[in-house]
Image: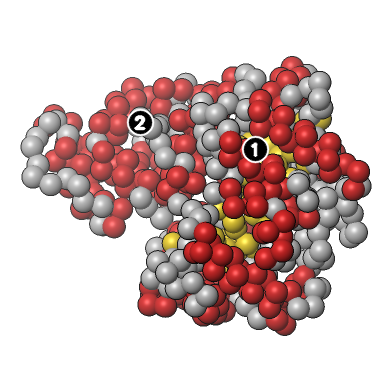
Amino acid sequence: MSEEPDMALDSTRVAATELETVVGARLPEGERAAAGRLAALAQFYIDDPFTHLETARARLGLDRTEFARHLELFDSVPELRRAVTQGPTGKYWDNTFLPLEASGAIDAVLAGRTAFPHRVGLYPGPTCMFRCSFCIRVTGARYEARSVTPGNEMFAALIDEAPTDDPYRFYLSGGLEPLTNPGLGELITHAAGRGFRLSCYSNSFALTEQALTRQPGLWDLHALRTSLYGTDEAEYQATTTKKGAYERVKNNIKNLLRMRRDRGSDLRVGFNYVVLPGQVARLHRLIDLFAEINEAAPDRPVDFLTLREDYSGEPDGRISPAERAELQETLLAFEEYAARRTPTLNVDYGYALNSLRQGKETKLLRITPQTMRPAAHPQVAVQVDVLGDVYLYREAGFPGLPGADRYIAGRVTPQTGLREVIGKYLAEDPHIVPAQGDEFFLDGFDQAVTARLSQLEADTGAGWAAHRGLLHHTGPVASAEERR
């Protein structure tokens, strides 16, 4: 290898020719002719992280022996890896692919091996006070009140069963609203006692001072993630059908920040917000809202914002060039505005918005019934509701939802733990036949995992098992939760 004074540049932000130059300087003298092809290979995966290796080989015009040598060279040049993981589609690698591979969950899925899930969503809410326009919940559907106490006992036993090597294994969400469970605080404290750092996804309507006093275990959360449904009263009511919800949620978070400061709590407080087509111009209102909320505790402001997109109604998952340009311009202006008004706010743009803000034309990943996996991926993630039903996809965990029962792997009971449920499910060699519309049971994470697993299987089937997926974890990989 030739010596270079500084190879630590961010090669994702330089032109392809510059990356080729950097790569050439890294290669042995006799291999430097491969630099251009290696830079091109990196670009394939920057553009589309789900590229199959055989597709890449064909595009490079290499035979199998030549391509195998190029893959070995690729692994030897850290700038190539960095170009992929720090590029516009890098969130797929850092947030999902590499942590999952490091955990062993990917190997377990591909081998059909029983394993305790890498991520477990606990859905403890028996009901919800909102009737959101976008929600797939059956109107009025709820769990019977008598199911809550045995459900909480089941959740506690599930937490006791779980390996403790990953503090972020569990999170609280829905389904229905977690804060409608009167035993939620005790459950959180129980999990914290085993070393688990839970995040709770909530609408925060019920997060009053009285609730925080009544359920002190809520302070044992690692993070509270409030889903925002608008930036004023009219938007909130139009979405949730709940009059006064906007002011109540806003005041609840203000009070939470004050109480957090006074208690010296480590609880992280943030928001989730979905950007809809035609609404990008409203993004700056989020920062105005956070700046107002921060006035309640200027020394302990809102910690984070998670932005996601919903362009599911757009043809082929693409947005128009005009809207893409508007969205990129708005995101850049949003970043500048946030830096001025809320300088400590950490913004996570997720898969697609991160690409758009870097100017890349993004086609949103779209799984169809034809590309859904017959057994899903329970070693990676499942969701468990208050009855103990184990759902394979995150958007399926609603009571009475038509078709969702196809995606129940089994039920956790006092006699049957979660690992046993997964083992029995896999032993049956399941082949779920999806119906049209079942793809909407998958959220963005489920879709990314599904596409990645199919990619890895294709690479392995083509004889590239040693290099499947192009990149592999190298040593410890921080989870998305740890980086936040």
Q: Residue at x 64, y 63 (%)?
A: 227
Residue linked to disc 2: 474
The secondary structure type at the circle numbered 1 is helix
Toward which corner of the image does residue 146 lie, by quadrant?
Answer: top right
Q: In the image, which disc is placed on residue 170?
A: none
- Amino acid at dot 1: His
User: Where residue 115 appears, x then y in whole percent?
Assistant: 62, 23
Q: Is residue 75 left or right of residue 140?
A: left
Residue at image position (62%, 62%) is 226
Q: Quadrant of residue 37?
A: top left
Residue 121 vs residue 283, the one in the foreground: 121
Which comes before the other along the chain, label 2 or label 1? 1
Q: Helix, strand or loop at disc 2? A: loop
Q: Nearer the viewer, residue 378 or 66?
A: 378
Distance from disc 2 to disc 1, alpha carbons, whole Å, reads 34 Å
Measured from the top left, where is residue 380 in percent x and y?
60, 33
What residue sits right under mark 1 in the picture? 190
Residue sitting at 44 percent across and 24 percent down? Answer: 464
Report whether residue 422 is seen. no
Mark 2 belongs to which amino acid?
Answer: Thr
Quarter of the image with the N terminus is: top left
Q: Residues within 10 Å of mark 2 (few under 14, many from 20)?
A: few
Q: Are marks 2 and 1 in contact (CB under 8 Å)?
A: no
Where 464 sits versus 266, above or below? Answer: above
